Amino acid sequence: MKRRSGLSRSVLFAGAVIVLLVVIAGVFGLALSSSKQSSTSAKSSTSTSSGTPPPTSSAGTSTATFSLTGYNLSQPIGVAYDPANGDIYVTNNLTNTVSTINVASRSLVATINVGLAPAAAIFDPANKYLYVTNNDSDSVSVIDGGSNSVTKTIALGGIHPDGITLDTANDCLYVAEHGNSGGSNGVAVINATSNSLLREIGTNNYPTGVAYDSSNGDVYVTTSASNVVVIDTVTNGITQQIGVGNRPSGIAFDSTNGNIYVANTVSGTVSVIAGSSNTAVATISVSTSVLSAPYLVAFDPANGYILVSNTFSSGIDVIDGSTNSLVKLVSTGFQSAPAGLALDSDNGNLYVAGHASDSITSITSNLTASPF
């Protein structure tokens, strides 16, 4: 998911601050303006990588060598898995496309044109469609996995759509609309049966990540105000706000323990929210080095792990949901800037988009990483 520029945090050395700002701008690089830039930047921009590379924790696996060609990847962010055809879909933020990759053959199946600056992606098992948020087109592309074609583009009422989640009980999609300094911050609700916009829920403070709790029926939305907004999916009203760490971004629901896990990018922590009470119950440090920026989150029900892409540590933070403790950091490659995560329900692998390295990493259930 594309992020606004301007994130910063205190570190021990001034040089580390410069690295932090430059790399974060590359991964979360949407400017604080409403102008549409991606159509022109696709012709001239390159992946951001500057200064001394951030350290990678020795707790991770050995760094792999990645192929930068073959899948037409260009600053990939979002990843989704389609169990119906065994393909993964990767959003290319720079070239306004989605790469369809077959898992079994590890081959590029198709390159699909979507809107400007595609960010997050999610697969709906009910209708077998893939949904992609187009950050600079203010829309959601609906992709048929059978034909690898866009069947519809849903225009939104807000601007800069970012994270997306699926309410499986009502077959509705909730899309965080990051907005801009002039407002238009909110959450769009889409009926996935008719693929039509139902309503807009107004929020404040730049919503980015969004997750659905199947136990209580709530939707959780991260905002730049260091809190998580809770939406009741029955009334589509905001019921409360939960304080978390600094600049929360990615968020995921753990169906095993009923907790919600929030990546606090600037704090270098992961907040744990109990879905039963909608209160923050724990904070997990994932700072294995001076530079740490947890970004997006996924839950693996097979082993109870919470998986967090860590931009500066160039790896995946693995958290044990039963103890809420950090297990290890799995390397995704030197300066790879890992972003989106998708679990393969058939083989148990995790696929990670390397935003800066234009790569995909495959991580097995025993936490072994390899280039895909």
Image (cartoon, grey):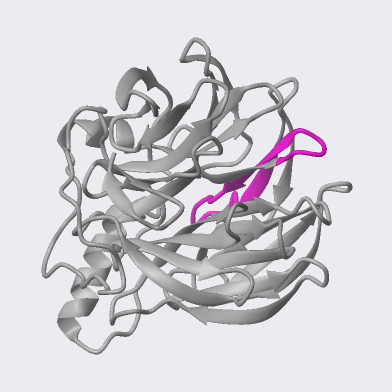
Provide residue 107's location: percent of width, then percent of height: 30, 23
Give whichever of 199, 119 is nearer the camera: 119
Pick whichever, 31 or 211, lies toward us: 211
Whole-percent x and y of residue 128?
63, 22
Along the line of sight, the residue nearer the viewer: 146 or 152:
146
- The image shows residue 334 at horizontal and vertical percentages of 18, 59
Position of residue 87 relative to residue 46, above or below, is: above
Q: Is residue 268 visible?
A: yes
Q: Is residue 132 visible?
A: no
Single out the residue that lies furthest toward the top: 147
> Which of the 4 image quadrants contains residue 276?
bottom right
Is 111 inside the magenta-drawn segment?
no
Locate residue 123: give its quadrant. Answer: top right
In the displayed orientation, state which residue is furthest to the right.
235
Q: Write the start and end of the magenta stretch as one range.
A: 167-189
Residue at 60%, 61% (x, y): give it.
304
> Taking 277 as reference, is 309 left or right?
left
